[in-house]
Amino acid sequence: MEALLTSRVVPVQVPFRKLSSFSADLSCLELRRYPCRRGSVSIMNHPLVHPVTASVQPLRVSALGHEGNTVPSKEILDLWRNVEAVCFDVDSTVCVDEGIDELAEFCGAGKAVAEWTARAMGGSVPFEEALAARLSLFKPSLSKVDEYLQKTPPRLSPGIEELVKKLRANKIDVYLISGGFRQMINPVASILGIPRENIFANNLLFGNSGEFVGFDENEPTSRSGGKAKAVQHIRKGRLYKTMAMIGDGATDLEARKPGGADMFICYAGVQLREAVAAEADWLIFNFEPLINSLN
């Protein structure tokens, strides 16, 4: 999720096939209660989903002026082939959608959230402030989030399942690090075979009656610079020698720092953020180069 980048963004048209039907077994719905200043809150997980793989049309690299880092240097290629852990952004990387925008649209507040996001992009706004402001515009209830998950399967980026499968086969640990919500990311992790403990994301909080009461401010990804801190936390705890971050936005790029990711791979298969792409160690428009490099 990258709503606050002020540089030029080049969108990619993403046609996709719709499922004729989608159902979920509510008996598998998992409710977990947490303490909150306003009383107990419930965090909902929905493990049973069926994905839709989107079809992304590649951009013409020559028209964008980033030919240099579309071919990795030997150093970067060696890092990738010896990586011990890979962290993925979710929105516009693992999935083709921006989760909060899609949920807002489903709740009937898509236009209002989009307008606020457009205003936020005009200046420097802390991530936590932007997240709180947009959520306050539609305040999704537990029942509304559950309905959204039933009717809207995850739309995965082409090739992501194959890449994650390849990484796991090579004994490379995979993490999902997102400014989005666990309720919407847990199903994606289940599809890709990524354990829940390898997810770093935000939590929507609900009251006893299922009403929206906010988001968990203790999650590192709920604040500016949170993704970088999450990667550093992972590296410190697991003692990885080499780590990579793959994403589309500035907050993903920030994860490449001492004690964090050794390399940043910019995925521009959904959106190309030019300022981010220019700073990437490797710019890709699909996941094939990463898959082939692991063979």
Image (cartoon, rainbow, N blue to C red):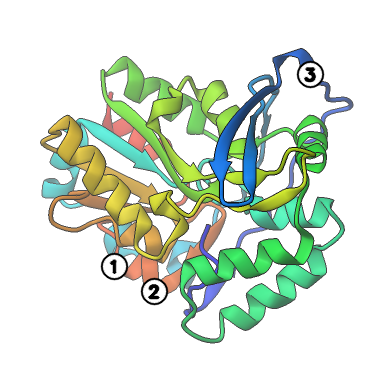
Disc 1 crowd, CA 10 A, few/some/many (<14, 14-19, 20+): some
Amino acid at the residue labelled 2: Ala
Disc 2 crowd, CA 10 A, few/some/many (<14, 14-19, 20+): some
The circle drawn on residue 26 is 3
- Residue 122 placement: quadrant: bottom right
Give the residue number, with chain letter if any, for mark 2. Answer: 275
Q: Look at the image and tell me whether residue 182 can be seen.
A: yes
Give the residue number, with chain letter if any, for mark 1. Answer: 279
Q: CA distance from mark 2 to mark 1?
A: 7 Å
Ranked by sequence position, the earlier of labels 2 and 3 is 3
Residue at image coords 28%, 53%: 229
Provide residue 29's location: percent of width, then percent of height. Answer: 71, 21
Ranked by sequence position, the earlier of labels 1 and 3 is 3
Measured along the vertical axis of the image, is residue 89 above or below residue 81?
below
Provide residue 230's location: percent of width, then percent of height. Answer: 31, 47
The reply, left or right, for residue 153 in relation to residue 143 is: left
Mark 1 or mark 3, which is nearer to you? 3
Q: Secondary structure at mark 2?
A: helix
The circle drawn on residue 151 is none
Q: Are marks 2 and 1 in contact (CB under 8 Å)?
A: yes
Amino acid at the residue labelled 3: Leu
